[in-house]
Amino acid sequence: MTATTSNATSPEVDLRTIFAELSPAAIPALAVSATPAIVPPPVRQLILPTYGQTITSQPTGHTYTVGMQIGEGYFSRVFKGTDEFDDKVAIKVLKPRGTYEQDRLAAIGEFERLLTLRHKRITHVQDAFIYQDAFYIVTEECGMTLDYYMGVENNDAVRWVEGVARCVCSALEYIHRHDMVYLDLHPGNVFFYWGRDELNPDALTGATLKIGDLGIAKPVAEITPAVTMANWMFPPEVLDPTFGPTGKAIDIYHCGLLLLQMAVGRRMRFTNREILEGVPRDLALKLAEPHRSAIEKALRRRVEFRTPTARDLWLDIKGRLA
């Protein structure tokens, strides 16, 4: 089924307004209930797009053809897609988590972060809109994730340590310069990206890497030990405040975990107890140079002794390569 486009689409539409309040005719009225406030409202039904379906963004008038689902996380589902220029895109559909207004504000937050944090190592956002009462965010499509790559038998992940470190640290440094913390750096959010050869569109060109999904990124001032992230990603300072303050150092620790997995060539997850006991750093100390010193420093439990910035982490690795 094809969505109905608006009668008049401005060529100068401001994408920052795409999730503004719609008219009552466009949104089903929310029933007013006498239910006590302590009872959470029912979660809205999510109507997912189907394979081959074309959907149109009302704010921009652009149409997208939906492909297969390529990922699902706690907050969203992601589908392959193509736009009107035959460019591959990723179509992210946010799952209902609260009231319509709460979900609208969450969508606005993620979209504005993507608009603000435009960098060559961060997936580029190109559209966002509401369709069938769900919030959509469209970005460029990348290739497979590092998580998928490390699941391949006999992978050669160790050869990618320097390339991953350069690209990811570049993105983190940019995010941190904007006083934001990513909070979600793991192999499933780092993507291989291949450019397009216009003379041979189906061919793969040289690969680089980008990070994506800024859904839970927050300003530094809002980071507390109660910050939202997957349990297996808690750094020492979140589990035990005596290890230091929470902030940008969380991303440094996550980068250390990422590079450790690349260096050993397999996925690794640690329990909270193992994190508090320093098991990841102990494993990093068993690596060979040029990776050992840089990665173990990024995985130090005490924030004051951890690598201070993403730039320093890359320079530590680069220096060992010299």
Image: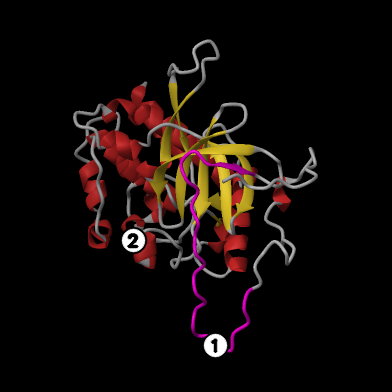
Which amino acid lies under the numbered mark 1 shown in the image of this protein?
Thr
Relative to 26, 246 lies left or right: left
Q: Which residue is mark 2?
A: 231
In the rendered structure, which disc, 1 or 2, sits on the residue that comes first in sequence? Answer: 1
How far across and down, in percent of the image, does residue 98 sit? 52, 69
Q: Residue at x 67, y 47 (%)?
A: 4
Q: Quadrant of residue 174?
A: top right
Residue 33 inside the magenta-drawn segment = yes
Relative to 169, 219 lies left or right: right
Q: Name the residue furthest top.
A: 199
How far apart are labels 1 and 2 at the CA level? 33 Å
How far across and down, in percent of the image, does residue 25 sit? 73, 64
Q: Which residue is mark 1?
A: 35
> Is residue 256 shown above or below 28?
above
Which sits in the foreground, 232 or 241? 232
Q: Bounds of the magenta span? A: 30-56
The disc at residue 190 is none
Q: Residue at x 22, y 31 (%)?
A: 288
Q: Residue at x 47, y 46 (%)?
A: 50
Other residues around mark 1 within 10 Å, as few (<14) / some (14–19) / many (≥20): few
Other residues around mark 2 within 10 Å, as few (<14) / some (14–19) / many (≥20): few
Q: Quadrant of residue 160?
A: top left
Residue 265 inside the magenta-drawn segment = no
How far across and down, in percent of the image, does residue 309 sit? 48, 43
